[in-house]
Amino acid sequence: MSLTSEERVLKTLRREEVDRIPTFEWFVDQKVIDAIYPGSTYQEFVYKADQDAICVDLDYKSEELEPQVYRDEWGIVKKDTGESHTYPIDGPIKTMADLAMYEPPDPHKPERYLTLESELQAHQGKKAVILHLNDVFSIPSRLMKFEHFLMTTIDNPKLIEGIIELCVEVNLKMADEAVKRGVKIIYTGDDFAHKLGPMISPADFKKIFFPPLCRVMGGYKDRGLYIIKHTDGEIMPLIDMIVDSGIDCLDPIDPTAGMNIAEIKKKYGHRIALKGNVDCAQTLTFGSVEQTIAESKKCIQLAGTGGGYIFSSGNSIHSGVKPENYVAMMETHKKYCNYPIQL
């Protein structure tokens, strides 16, 4: 059985039999790409590395407020860190009056989908083209300063609920536009936790965030989309709610937070697929090639057996990852990815 990358990913998300374990990353830093395949674009890298998906963001404009400080179409103020990701520092909503006056980005704006359309035209049918949308945490928590957001979940939860509802509606309208263009898979990149546990208490998460999480995930599913849910951190106090929301796959089973992919596979592998989780904070950044190979083989053995597994790092391939370690990780996958798994 020989499958296209798109077929391989879709079957894996349905936990069906495939020819080999699929692999891709949400993000591969250009510095790492240049070290491995000099002069290659991200898309060229995906083909040269025989990965299975092209990951795409929607197009948003930003205005420069001062050197290295920008405001995007959501009104989120961000600082350029010199790395590929900016750092949110402020937002437009602090009160119910601000929410009443707030205008979100136009989800139907044709220019928002130009990159997506280009990637679908170039790669669909060969690679899985996966669109980044959001669920209930990342955008709401950036529409005001983060400390204020956390306090407002306690002092004025109705404001947070209103912001979340607005974000859910916008993302579902964006999903409508994406489906029209042929998108089949999305991932939501909202982090719910840090290394020590959830950023919101499980009780407050269940009351404030879980109902809209079910609405947005249910809305994506109603539109025929497959959902890969990303969240860093120690999510065990929330994991039942995350799985119950209707996702197809959980990523990245964060090893830096002590998440155990074997335990997750045993408990939830009959309901969802898994993606992860070679440690990109320690092993890929500071470890040796030998350590990388050993950890990659362990992930394949623990999570790959029986299917329903996408091999990847425990987050992304950031600029600090040693290129030789990432090459070793990819070569280990290539050597041991075929079913039936034999290590």
Image: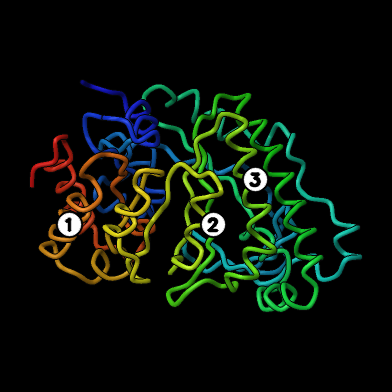
Q: Residue at x 14, y 35 (%)?
A: 340
Q: Circle 2 sits on which residue?
A: 241
The answer to which image quadrant residue 126 occupies is top left
Disc 1 marks which residue? Answer: 298
- For mark 1, give the secondary structure: helix
Where residue 61 is drawn, which disc sits there? Answer: none
What type is the residue that disc 3 sits on? Answer: Val
Q: Are marks 2 and 3 in contact (CB under 8 Å)?
A: no
Residue at image location 42% in from the left, 26% down from the top: 123
Query: Which residue position holds label 3?
Result: 216
The residue at 26%/45% (across/down) is: 37
As rendered, which of 286 and 184 lies closer to the eye? 184
In the foreground, 161 or 177: 161
Q: Residues within 10 Å of mark 1 (few under 14, many from 20)?
A: some
Amino acid beneath label 2: Met
2 or 3: tag closer to the N-terminus: 3
Q: Which one is earlier in the sequence, the residue at label 3 or at label 1?
A: 3
Mark 2 to mark 3 CA distance (whole Å): 13 Å
Q: Residue furthest left?
A: 343
Real-space Cα separation, disc 3 to disc 1, in angstroms:
34 Å
Label 2: state its secondary structure: helix
